Image (cartoon, rainbow, N blue to C red):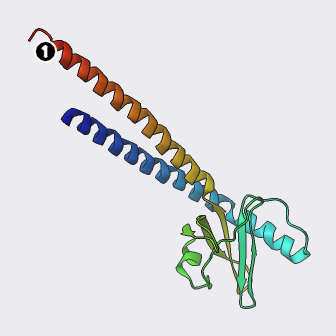
Amino acid sequence: AIVGTLVGAALILTSLATALLMRSDLMDGVDKELQSVARPVANQALADLIRANSAFPSNYAFQLQSRGGAVTTRPTGVNDYPDLPDLPITDPRVISNDPFTVGSVSGPLKWRFIAGRVTGADATFAVGIPLTTLNHTVARLLVTTAAIGTLALIGSIVLAWFAVRRAFRPL
């Protein structure tokens, strides 16, 4: 029983550590992607807004903030809007271009954004993506490792039971 508990605890801790590391690595990838596409996506979205064209399908959310208010476009296939805070040009997130996470206006969906200043204007933009895929991947990893860990634990307990039974059979 003690060995089974220790093996079970080790499997749980290993699974949680793996999920945490996986999430961190995936988040780093999302951040690098956002840093490389933020300016081009913002330029395209601004051009679409100026021409009043219907925007091309996109995987990115976009928000333009100015003194006149905010205009938000969401990614194709996403039904919720990000709940972005006010981002004045003096906001540290705008100045640093560091990624940040926000929730949704309604619902549990989380988003990752990068903000910047619109060149030549007293306005800011934010470009982001929903973290649906990242969360789904981590959840699948946890389910898979839990299933494999459970099978390994049951197998270990059954083998230990047979080994103990066989070892004490002559007694």
Q: Is residue 4 above or below residue 93?
A: above
Residue 98 visible in the current orientation: no
> Is 54 left or right of 68, judged from the image as shown?
right
Q: From the image, tell me which residue sits under label 1.
A: 168
Q: Nearer the viewer, residue 160 or 82?
A: 160
> Is 116 left or right of 146, judged from the image as shown?
right
Residue 67 appears at what percent x and percent y?
71, 91
Residue 120 appears at what percent x and percent y?
74, 82
Q: Residue at x 25, y 17 (%)?
A: 162
Q: Amino acid at mark 1?
A: Phe
> Is 135 left or right of 159, judged from the image as shown?
right
> Is 52 left or right of 137, judged from the image as shown?
right
Residue 52 appears at what percent x and percent y?
90, 75
Q: Residue at x 53, y 79 (%)?
A: 92
Residue 68 visible in the current orientation: yes
Q: Is residue 103 above or below residue 161?
A: below
Q: Residue at x 73, y 58 (%)?
A: 59
Q: Quadrant of residue 2?
A: top left
Residue 27 appears at what percent x and percent y?
53, 55
State the SS at label 1. Answer: loop
Q: Which image quarter holds the N terminus? A: top left
View extreme (top): residue: 170
